[in-house]
Image (cartoon, rainbow, N blue to C red):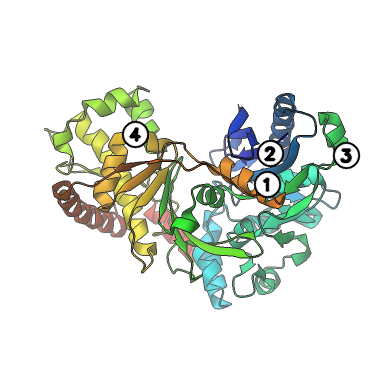
Amino acid sequence: MGKQYIGIDLGTSSIKMGLFDQDLSLQHGYQQTYQYMNSANGAREIDPNIWFDIVLTGLHQLVKHARSSDSIAAIGITGQMHTTVFLDQSGNIVRPAILWNDTRTKALVVGLKKQLNIIRESENAKIVSTGSPLVNLIWLKREEPSHFKALQHLLMPVDYIVYRLTGHYSTDYCDASTSSLFDFKQSRWATKICQEFGIDERILPTIHTSSDVIGELKFSLANQLGLPSVVKVVAGTGDNAATALANKTDQEQQPLISLGTSGVVVVPNRRHQLKQIGKNIMFKVGAENESVLTQGVVQTGAVLNDWWLRSIINTEDADAEQRKIPRRLLGKNTVLFFPHLNGEKTLYADPNLRGAFIGIGLETTKDNMYLAVLEGLAFGCRQLYEQMRNCAATNFIRIVGGGAKSTLWLTIFANVFGLPVHKRTVQREAIDGAVMLALIGDGDNVTVQAEDDVVILPDRSLKQAYDVQYQKYLKMATLLISDALRTGDEEVEKMSSLS
């Protein structure tokens, strides 16, 4: 009887779980949404117990559908990155976790970048932003000193679930390298940064490869679930790295774009060179398998589609609205859209940045504006890609996520990039990557059946038209960044003065 594996994906607003066979075929799924605290001052927090309660409920459901009580061999976990969990000496929660999208710390970031550059930590200075574990720690030290004093273990969400399942503290290279607390030269925690900011390095967990077995399911949990306690739990990894693994990004050496809540552009780098633009993610599947993934993000990705449909034109029928857009408008739209509605971290490092429509006239229609929204994200992703791309030839881009369901959007991307767009007939998501890590940790071979791609080719004339449009987009972006049209100029000046 074949082994089975459980995958867990800890999203920002929902948790997805699944029971999988060795060939990554899903046998049973479970998903539960949840709410986090969202305050006007930019605070985004959650009680980590909410995550574990959902995970425990999901495990009970999945076990009921297992072939037998001893068929489940291992558990792999992925999820949101940067969100910071604070535990005391006994592993109890000190305070609610600070989420990756928390913006209370924006006044600290400018000065923190400057301080990191002074101590020659330019790689960490480049990536530190609101929501980063380092800035969250500094905020905690300044604003809640009693909580900082009680802190004995700092974890990310994946690590917290691993801890609750096994009783062991751990993290992987992906989450460690994006924390702004990592020494890229030594592949370890950055002692110099900890000393500079008065952080006890002992609160940081041991760094593992993503498929390392951290431990076995705690006896009490195994007994509660009716499972043998020999179920292995691997270290797991961040959601974008897991998505890249599931889609063979490192093997194909082609860029991956994930059109989820945010628009994530991932460029693999087999030479292990750290790029100047983008977040360099150290990803070690196993001891002999190391790569660097350079990641850039448009903060508002496919959520732009929901924003336009629900908040602006009050509908949820994306297909119907996209069918209304005349195809003759592609490449000829007179309206441009700047897609950064919720700040930007990679190119401009400005949490106050906001979006804009340019070129609206009396002749402008709803179709012009909706198409501009779809095109704007494609332009924004191309701008990221061009800053992070490798010297190696790019043959195609692979697109995944909810936005990949739109053939119109994929067509726009193919022509904006001037490259074939590949989409898998069977979508491989972060949870699939988590299961692959569980298989590897269990010593099993990952045998996934060959899958066909849906391929959308660029049209030569349309590509040329979009090249012209893209240059207009870049000019618009320059004007918006340098001009007083940008929202929050006074706030930026105020933050700069704090450093």
Kindly tell me whether residue 34 is visible in this rendering.
no
- Answer yes or no: do the residues labelled 1 and 2 have beta carbons within 8 Å? yes
Tell me how far mark 3 sits from mark 1, CA to CA: 19 Å
**What residue is shown with label 1?**
438
Mark 1 / mark 2, whichever is N-terminal: 2
**What residue is shown with label 3?**
219
Label 3 crowding class (10 Å Cα cut-off): few <14, some 14-19, many 20+? some
Q: Position of residue 447 (x, y in %)?
A: 58, 45
Query: What number is the disc on residue 5?
Result: 2
Quadrant for residue 50, please give it.
top right
Mark 4 / mark 1, whichever is N-terminal: 4
- Answer yes or no: do the residues labelled 4 and 2 have beta carbons within 8 Å? no
Q: Nearer the viewer, mark 4 or mark 1?
A: 1
**What residue is shown with label 4?**
406
Please name the amino acid that badge 3 sits on: Phe
Q: Nearer the viewer, mark 4 or mark 2?
A: 2
Q: Position of residue 317 (x, y in %)?
A: 35, 22
Q: Which image quadrant: the N terminus?
A: top right
Is 107 left or right of 199, judged from the image as shown?
left
| Helix, strand or loop under label 3 | helix
Mark 4 / mark 2, whichever is N-terminal: 2
Please name the amino acid that badge 1 sits on: Ala
Tell me how far mark 4 sits from mark 2, CA to CA: 31 Å
